[in-house]
Amino acid sequence: MDIVEEKAIAIVSRAATEAHRGQTRKDGKTPFIVHPERVAKCVAHYGGNHVGVIAAWLHDVIEDNTEGAAIVRKALEETCLPENNLHEIYAIVLALTKNPAIPGKRERFADTLDRILHAPDQAILVKICDRMDNLIDARDQGQQFLSEYLDLTDELIATLSDGANRHGYTEALEQLKVEREDMGFFYEAKFF
């Protein structure tokens, strides 16, 4: 990454930190910002460029903040990135944002996956990394939540596999499969 891209990442990481200030993960203790930070690191680890890393930092801002879209746009405007990068990042963030107008958790999830498939390719990598990180927190949830979460993870893997392989995210996808399998063993041991 060049200096402009690194500076852009610093700008959006600060904006995401501010947008998620006071928010916590499901445990009620862990600051929420650790999640986008881990997702961004995962995206970089599995070959994402600055566009994917920035989208990872911002991927929950719209969903978790009433002024989220404005926050994302403002943060992107503060970078010196080319216009095509800004459009690509914003498209990824929008694809990853659940549509609250769609009733039903499974229906919203299917809609999100469909939008990811039609978004710039790094949306797939960000979603895979997002799911890997969310599996960490899922361990602390109840049986019904965990069962549904594993089912939705299977749906995610099935839906995004072709795109992940086509765009060079096979290693990330395979790691998600390992994490999902480990969580399945954890689920069996915890509840049966």
Image: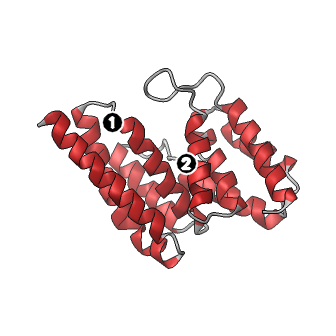
Q: Which mark is residue 97?
A: 2
**Distance from label 1 to label 2 (Cα)?**
23 Å
In this figure, what is the number of numbered marks? Answer: 2
> Mark 1 packing: few (<14 Cα in 10 Å), some, or many (20+)?
some
Marks 1 and 2: which is nearer the front?
1
| x 36%, y 44%: residue | 105
Q: Which residue is mark 1?
A: 139
Of residues 29 and 23, the one nearer the viewer is: 29
Which quarter of the figure has residue 90? bottom right
User: Circle 1 — which element?
Assistant: loop
Of residues 168 and 102, the one nearer the viewer is: 168
- Hey, which residue is sitting farthest bottom in the picture? 166
Q: Amino acid at mark 1?
A: Arg
Instruction: Find residue 86 and report its horizontal and vertical position in percent.
Output: 77, 59
Say whether marks 1 and 2 touch (CB < 8 Å).
no
| x 46%, y 75%: residue | 165
Position of residue 136 in the picture relative to residue 86 (left or right): left
Instruction: Find residue 94 and report its horizontal and vertical position in percent.
Output: 61, 53
| x 46%, y 71%: residue | 170
- Decide: is 129 above or below 121: above
Instruction: Find residue 5 and report its horizontal and vertical position in percent.
Output: 81, 58
Quadrant assignment for the N terminus = bottom right
Of residues 181 and 108, the one nearer the viewer is: 181
Q: Amino acid at mark 2?
A: Thr
Of residues 52 and 46, the one nearer the viewer is: 46
Quadrant assignment for the C terminus = top left
Q: Which color scheme did the rendering employ for the protein?
A: secondary structure
Between discs 1 and 2, the one toward the N terminus:
2
